[in-house]
Image (cartoon, rainbow, N blue to C red):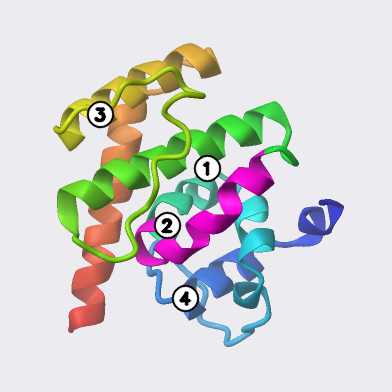
Amino acid sequence: MNKTSSITGDQLANALHVLGINFIMGGKDNDESLHKHPARLIVALAQSGEARLRLSLIPLFLEHPEYAVHVQKLIKKLNLSAQLTLQCYYSAAVYLQKKYTAKSPTLPNHFSKDLNLTPVDDPEENLRALAQRHKELSGSFVNWLATYQHAEQIWQKGLEFQKR
């Protein structure tokens, strides 16, 4: 998947903008090529060196649950760090979708077993458990719950912006 290494942050922002995801500043160019290749977009976001671009995976899956069909195949093609990013951010989107929308199709919970999580009916509890597991697996002291909540807040603001 070395084609993704040549994808720039601006191209990713543009693709997100074209897809109606107002999560990243910029993306006003009408270059519509990358958004037509969801697998390449997902991989490029998961492998991005920019945290804001990696985090945009959450609103991507919330806005385009049909992209979920790609994640299980793609996960095997990523390095361990990008795998963890994709698994955790995708899982966060799964739990947030249960919290906010009855959007169809619903995101299947692909990674609970891989992450050694047992989901419950409470999306907030699932997010807390995911954040703890993300911390353990990443070995970093990032407040992952706050990170997911930040993505949630920015995504909500983007939805409000679209309504206006």
110 lies left or right of 130: right
Tell whether 62 sits left or right of 162: right
Which of the two discs, 2 and 3, labels the residue nearer the N terminus? 2
The answer to whether residue 64 shows anywhere in this view is yes
Which of marks 2 and 1 precedes in the sequence? 1
Q: Which residue is mark 3?
A: 126
Badge 4 element: loop
Q: Which mark is residue 51?
A: 1
Q: Residues within 10 Å of mark 4 (few under 14, many from 20)?
A: some
Q: Quadrant of the C terminus?
A: bottom left
- Circle 2/circle 4 CB separation < 8 Å: no
Q: Which residue is mark 2?
A: 61
Label 2: few (<14), some (14–19) or many (≥20) C-alpha neighbours in 10 Å: many
> Which residue type carries mark 1?
Ala
| Residue located 46% across and 24% down the image | 113
The mark lying in front, picked from 4 and 3, is 3
Q: Number of marks in the image?
A: 4
**Amino acid identity at mark 4:** Leu
Proximity of marks 4 and 3: CB atoms separated by less than 8 Å: no
The span from disc 1 to disc 3 (Cα, nearest Å) is: 22 Å
- The earlier-in-sequence mark between 1 and 3 is 1
Label drawn at residue 20 = none
Alpha carbons under labels 1 and 4: distance apart: 20 Å
**Which numbered tag is attached to residue 19?**
4
Q: Amino acid at mark 3?
A: Asn
Q: CA distance from mark 4 to mark 3?
A: 28 Å
Residue interval drawn in magenta:
61-75
Q: Is residue 79 magenta?
A: no
The x, y position of residue 141, in whole percent, is 43, 15
Toward the bottom, the furthest residue is 30
Precedes in sequence: disc 1 or disc 4: 4
